[in-house]
Structure formats: C-alpha cells, structure tokens
Amino acid sequence: MKKLLAAAVLVAAVLAPGLVLGEKEKQPAVPFYRKYLVAGIPLDDRILLQEKRVEANPDSADLRNDFGNLLAARRFPKEAREQYEMAMKLDKHHFLAPYNLGLLYETQGQTRKAISAYQKSVDRNRGFPPSRFRLGRLYEKSGSPQKAIRQYARALQIDPDMRDPRRNPLIVDTQLLAQVSLENYPLDLASASMATEAAYLDRGLMRKLPLDRMLSSEDLKPSPTGPPAGTPPAGPSPVQVIAPSSPPRREPGPGVLRNQPAMTAEPTPDVIVPGAESEEAPPPLPTPDPGGGRPLYVGGAVRPAPPPTPTPVSN
C-alpha cells in the first residue's frame, strides 16, 4: 500500500509541470510589438486602438488590412504581413491587402514576392490600376519589358490621369512610356470616336488615391461632400430669362406736390449726331467727266476712245 501511494505521488510530481505548462500555453501570448509601444506617441496609440477593434471584430478583412498598415508604418513587417495574409483569407475578393503586401515586400527588396502579391491583387480586381502599374514597374526593373508594357498600357487605359506626374510621380521612372502610348493608340483612337459617358471606374475616387503609400479601407470610400458614385456629371445651368419690368415708383419726398408729374431726366448721349433739324449738309462737289460724255467702265475707269477708222489707199 505504501508502495502504491509512493508511486502515485511520484507520477503526480512528474505530470504536474506538464499540466502547468499546458495552462500557460493556452493563455494568449503577448504580441511582440506591444512591448516597444510608447504611450503618448500618436502612431503607437493608433496601433493599440486598432488592436482593440480587431479583437472586437476578428473576422473583418478591412480592419486587419488597416492594422497591417499601422504595423508596417511602425516597422513591424512580420506582424504586418500576418495581418495582410489573414485579411486575404477572410475575404477572397479583398484586393487592397495583397496590394499593400506587395508594397511591403518591395520595401524589403523581395521583388519576386512583391510581383506575386501584385498579381494576386490584379486577379482579385482587374480594374484596379495601381496594382497593374506597380506590377509593370517591377517587370521593367526585372528585365521583362513586354510584360511591363502590357501592365502599363492596361493601367493607363483604365486611368489616363496616371500619365500626369503630379498625380503619379512614378511615371517619370519608366523608360517605356513611348511604347506604351503606341500600344494604347488603337484603343485610344477608338475610344475617342465613341460618344459615350461610360467609364471603367469612379474617376473622382481614383484621383484621390495616392500611389506612394499603402491604402486603407477609408481610401476607397467616396468623399462625403461629393456626389455619390454613378451620378452623371451636372450639365450647364439653364439660362433664366427675366422679362423687363418698369422701374419702381418713387414716392415724392417732403415739400413736393403729389399731383405734380415726376420729372424724368433725358439721357445724355455720348456722341451728338446731327438730326433732321440740323442744318443741311453741303451738296457734293461736281465731278468732272474726263470721258467727254462717254460711259464709264464698271469700277469707275474711263472707257478708252475708239481707234480712228483707217483711210483706204487708192492705187
């Protein structure tokens, strides 16, 4: 009996550390980045606030994408990548997360992974020009000009404003813009010949999208002051014709007889033109008739005198 009791105590002593370790493993680990955050720094405060939002709604792909942006800005690339990948798993159509993941890889010099991420973004939304332009840029730097031209051409076809360096500073980086223009020339010519207001996207929304930073879910929301998406452009305001009205009647002031007719001032012309009452104009001077009574040519020239009749010569 004593031997059994001793054996039970020994087994319990051996299993106790394992049970304690199992309880510790069940507890959520403290995130790596949290111990480096400093209260009072705006970016760190935003990270803590976004962390609470994600914990309250862990299935939101938008919240995880925005959380990844904050972590990437704070130089925690591994944790940011985890949030992007989670957003991509939660929403199979989410195209911002792979786009931002491509930017993250690009800043780390991992070109192949960045290309793969941009390709996923293009597959999820083929009409999102920033992903195509970034993809074309990496193709150009990797020595694949034909692939780059196709991506550039498609991006500029969807959003022609990307040609403007003020809108897209990266456009000055490419050496293939002339070939891209030749690639798009037939399509541009056909589009210019069509009288239509159809568009691939909300141009007002795309013009505000920056191309030099990561994009959040707030960037894709329409401006609260602008018209809703799909609203046709406002045409010119109709001209309102106002019929002329008589001048307002002025009440006579003190000391003026009410029965006396109002005196209206005659407008004084700037230039006085003599009328019928003015003195008669002098008669025109007589024009001499240089032709001696002969009719005149059209235009005032004098008809020349006919040549003399030749006299017959007798033998």
Image: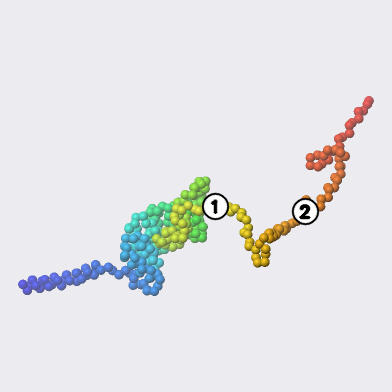
Q: In the structure shown, which secondary structural element does the residue marked by tag 1 occupy?
A: loop
**Residue found at x 65% / y 63%:** 252
Relative height, residue 30 to residue 271 (above, below): below
- Dot 1 amino acid type: Pro
* Three-letter amino acid code at the position of disc 2: Pro
Spot the residue most to the top: 315
Choose mark 1 or mark 2, whichever is in front.
Answer: 2
Disc 1 residue crowd, few under 14, some 14–19, many 20+, Cα 10 Å = few
Q: What percent of the width, then of the height, locates residue 61?
A: 35, 60
In the shown orientation, is residue 60 left or right of residue 131? Answer: left
Q: Position of residue 33 (x, y in %)?
A: 34, 69
Residue at the spot of label 2:
274
Q: Is 146 in front, or is 303?
A: 303
Residue located beneath label 1 in the image: 238
Residue at 34 percent of width and 57 percent of height: 91
Task: Give me the disc on residue 5.
Answer: none
Report crowding for label 2: few under 14, some 14 to 19, many 20 or more residues within 10 A (C-alpha): few
Q: Quadrant of the C terminus?
A: top right
**Marks 1 and 2, the one that precedes in the sequence:** 1
Q: Is residue 36 above or below residue 226?
A: below
- Would residue 280 be visible to someone looking at this image? yes
Which quadrant does the N terminus fall into?
A: bottom left
